[in-house]
């Protein structure tokens, strides 16, 4: 009787495990087929853009309008396809790094190690300006040092998958790698400097009075089908939000590509103009855009003679020091600490700009 009971009790478990395995295999097969189709379509984008521009619309090769239109028809689907692929993969990775888990990893870390960890985790942890306040409160009240918290707040919006995908798709892997490394160094250095300055007394008093239990949220156990679904949800959420900015940026970049003369930007944003880097940062800080809108413009500026360091400084200042984020952070930080934050990050961006103008 006992043996029969055990067999009956284990039957639902076996069926349940078998169903999960079948679901996982189905997701893998669908994913493999979808990836193959993705590569086939991706390879045909340039011939299709040329066909639409010159064969279907009969535009004259070499004309301003033809160059502008071909740029837009090729870059728009190319960047969108790259974005969908990478956001899906990063969405799966992010299922392993919830904000609560990130907070637990960073809590109690020494500043030097914590700055490096925070900057690295910022790449894969979902964050936007609207979540700056709850994340800041959660980190500080969980015992994460102030400088480590700022390393995360700098890295997460600046060195994200959208910026890296667009840079890779439009400018190549070398520029994307340069941006990744320098962005992480700015986040680590800026957070370390802010931590050394001991500015905790410039946090709003009501934040310091909050006491959070770091273990208040139980860890949710996800299976691989759940993680694939989270990847799909990330595509719908992120790509659904940024595609209008991406198309607008590519349209502006296409206009610059087609109509602005070669080397026109050299006098304004070239290496010889020593003032171009601080001017780019000063212009970029009060602006607001995301990576989807700014990277296509960056590509067009580089094509027209702008220096790499100047353009990277402009892009970093726009993304990392956006005005909406500063306004939101004012709820938890006193103005002097916000000023120090902007000043330290701006200095790091200036160093990067001048260094790359010197080296490249």
Image (tube, helix red, strand yellow):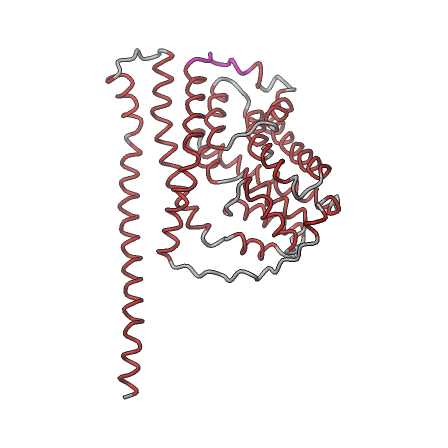
Q: Is residue 281 above or below residue 227?
A: above
**Which residue, as the protein is rendered here, is positioned at the far front?**
206
Q: Is residue 181 magenta?
A: no
Q: Please state which of residues 25 and 200 is positioned toward the viewer in this rendering.
A: 200
Q: How many marks?
A: 0
Q: Residue at x 39, y 45 (%)?
A: 88
Residue 46 pos. (x, y %): 31, 26
Magenta stretch: give its range.
259-266
Residue 83 pos. (x, y %): 40, 37
Q: Residue at x 45, y 21 (%)?
A: 252
Q: Please state which of residues 125 and 114 is positioned toward the viewer in this rendering.
A: 125
The answer to which image quadrant residue 1 occupies is: bottom left
Q: Residue at x 53, y 52 (%)?
A: 99
Name the dominant secondary structure of the magenta segment. loop
Q: Is residue 263 magenta?
A: yes
Q: Is residue 188 above or below residue 62?
A: below
Q: Please state which of residues 48 and 248 is positioned toward the viewer in this rendering.
A: 248
């Amino acid at each position: 009787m006992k043996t029969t009971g055990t067999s009956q009790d284990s039957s639902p478990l076996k069926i349940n495990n078998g169903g999960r395995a079948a679901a996982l295999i189905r997701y893998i097969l669908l994913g493999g087929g979808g990836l193959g189709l993705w590569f086939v379509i991706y390879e045909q984008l340039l011939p299709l853009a040329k066909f639409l521009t010159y064969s279907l619309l009969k535009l004259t090769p070499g004309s301003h309008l033809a160059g502008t239109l071909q740029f837009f028809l090729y870059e728009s689907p190319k960047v969108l396809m790259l974005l969908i692929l990478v956001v899906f993969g990063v969405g799966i990775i992010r299922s392993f790094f919830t904000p609560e888990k990130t907070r637990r990893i960073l809590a109690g870390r020494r500043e030097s190690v914590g700055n490096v960890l925070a900057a690295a985790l910022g790449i894969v942890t979902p964050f936007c300006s609207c979540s700056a306040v709850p994340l800041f409160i959660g980190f500080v009240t969980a015992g994460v040092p102030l400088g480590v918290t700022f390393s995360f707040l700098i890295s997460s919006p600046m060195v994200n998958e959208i910026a890296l995908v667009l840079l890779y798709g439009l400018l190549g892997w070398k520029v994307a790698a340069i941006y990744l490394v320098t962005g992480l160094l700015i986040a680590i250095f800026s957070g370390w400097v802010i931590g050394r300055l001991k500015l905790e007394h410039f946090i709003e008093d009501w934040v310091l009075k909050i006491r959070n239990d770091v273990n208040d949220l139980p860890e949710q156990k996800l299976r691989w089908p759940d993680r694939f679904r989270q990847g799909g949800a990330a595509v719908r959420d992120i790509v659904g939000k940024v595609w209008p900015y991406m198309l607008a940026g590519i349209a502006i970049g296409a206009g610059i590509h087609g109509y602005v003369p070669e080397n026109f930007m050299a006098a304004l944003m070239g290496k010889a103009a020593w003032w171009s880097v601080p001017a780019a940062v000063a212009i970029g800080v009060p602006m607001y855009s995301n990576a989807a809108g700014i990277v296509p413009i960056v590509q067009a500026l580089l094509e027209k003679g702008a220096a790499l360091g100047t353009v990277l400084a402009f892009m970093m200042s726009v993304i990392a020091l956006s005005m909406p984020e500063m306004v939101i952070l004012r709820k938890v930080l006193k103005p002097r600490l916000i000023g120090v934050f902007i000043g330290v990050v701006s200095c790091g961006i200036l160093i990067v700009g001048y260094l790359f103008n010197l080296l490249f």
